[in-house]
Image (spheres, rainbow, N blue to C red):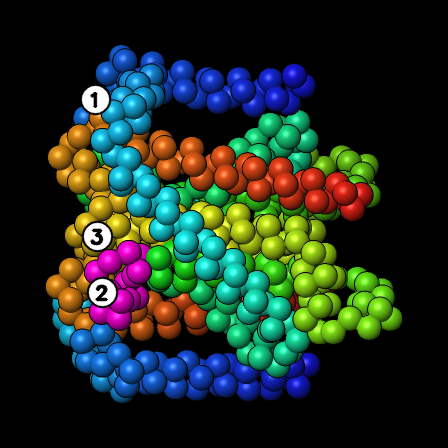
Amino acid sequence: MSSDRWKGVRNATVLLIGLLAAWQALYWFAGEAALRSPLETFRYTGKLVTSEAFWPHLSETMRAFAAALAIAAGVGLATGFWLGFHRFSNQVFEPMLVAIYSIPKITLYPILLLAFGLGMPAKIAFGAIHGIIPVALFTINAVRNIKPILIKTARMHRLGTFDLVRSVLFPAALPEIFTGLRVGFSLTLIGTLLGEMFAAQRGLGFLLMNAIGLHNVDLIMAVTLLLIAFAAVVSSVLLVIDRRLRRHV
Amino acid sequence: MTRVTLYRVLVIALAVLALEVLCLTGVIDRITMQPPHRILYDLGVILISGKRNAAIAKTLTNASIALALALIVGVATAAVLHGHRAVRETLDPLFATYYAVPIFAFYPLLIVLFGLGDAPQIGIGFMLGVVAVIVNTLNGLDRVPRVLLKAARIQRLGRIETALKVELPCAAPYVLTGAKFAVAYSLIGIIGAEFIMSRGGMGYEISFAYNNFDNATMYPLIVLILAVSISINASLSWWERVLLARRGL
């Protein structure tokens, strides 16, 4: 257990040092026009996060992301339980979900813009459509892999549908569902950011897109660094929880 | 036709019909969306007139190049990583975070490195697709039965020969799963990059049409991209099922 943790820390450190070294090497190779050195980027990021203008963008992104994640998790779980339970509906709908999962959703952004207008709802919708289907697909799998004996026992105890889901199906399927939520987290985040890049006038995605348009390398590097740091920290935490849940099964 | 297929067709037909009715009765106005029959008609006009053929060819060619690179590099990387446990464990957190990071942030960097041609777009498509191939190929290589490896040793196959003749064919269904993701990701990368900055391609045409309220061009092109990605995906899924069925799975 503790050797596992020690190994994790060591791996993370090696990875970080490796990435920083690669970054510095790329900087030496590509030069000032393409990117900044790690040190300069950290310095600029420090300046950015202490500046007044930055926080409204961050809070906008976080609000949009939270709403999108809530929708993705809610709709995804509901769809997943329904299809996981109801065999015939699953046969009808699962291939469709898989097909929708595989389409390049970025092409849908003009449609969402036309439907929702420029702003918060379009971003949330863009984030949610990225997250719903992976959550649903993992949940379907999780529910279908539950041992039938658990359901039979619950029936014997005359549990209603809601109680059955809450106290039997959900705990039994939790590890797999959590993996779905972890994947859903990543995809919802990228969806929200893409939505902001193409369909917003506030938020980190907009800041990034603006910086790309103006070729403001300092800002591109700083925003990218912040986004990577956020995604890395949260997905590492989720990964640790995920592994722990699986060990208990 | 089985009952499942019948219902599936019915669901899709009803959805299209609902859209058609909503559009024709004006609940969804013409500026937001054209009725589906009109989109199909416009698509026919575009394809027959050949006006957008250059853009379509450019996008699909670039996406195929990105896909091919992602597959070759991805499978090769996975094959090498599979033999180096420590390196693989170190890279695991990177793979887990990768898809939460907006890879498009690296587009300006690629433009500086490769110039404003097709290469930066192909680079983005490649970067998005390659990790999905690596992760899924590794997953497949993990599941190669030990007995096959022993058999390969008995036949005195070398390391490379074992990889090419035993391990990779055995992992093929999983590589195909990765390939399906890579198809979507390479299209996302190419089209997204074309949205941001380019001089042609379907993404460019779509965003140009969007900016000019030219729904007669925008919707057909979007539908075309969706149709291409869904049909490639469906054929890969079919191939995957054939491979699995041959193994009695």
Q: Is residue B113 left or right of residue B12?
A: left
2 or 1: tag closer to the N-terminus: 1
Which residue is tagged 3? B198
Chain letter belonging to callout 3 = B
Disc 2 marks which amino acid? Gly
Identify the element where label 1 is drawn.
loop
Which mark identifies residue B90?
none
- Which residue in the structure is indicated by mark 2? B115
**Is disc 2 placed on a helix, strand or loop?**
loop
Tell me the CA gap for discs 3 and 1.
Answer: 29 Å
Disc 1 residue type (three-letter): Arg
User: For mark 1, what is the residue?
Assistant: B30
Circles 3 and 1, Cβ within 8 Å, touching? The answer is no
Quadrant of the image occupied by residue B234 = top right
Mark 1, Cα crowd under 10 Å, few <14 / some 14-19 / many 20+, is few
Q: Are marks 2 and 1 in contact (CB under 8 Å)?
A: no
Instruction: Please name the amino acid that badge 3 sits on.
Output: Ser
Q: Looking at the picture, how far across and down is residue B245, in whole percent?
A: 75, 41
**Residue B192 in sight from this viewpoint:** yes
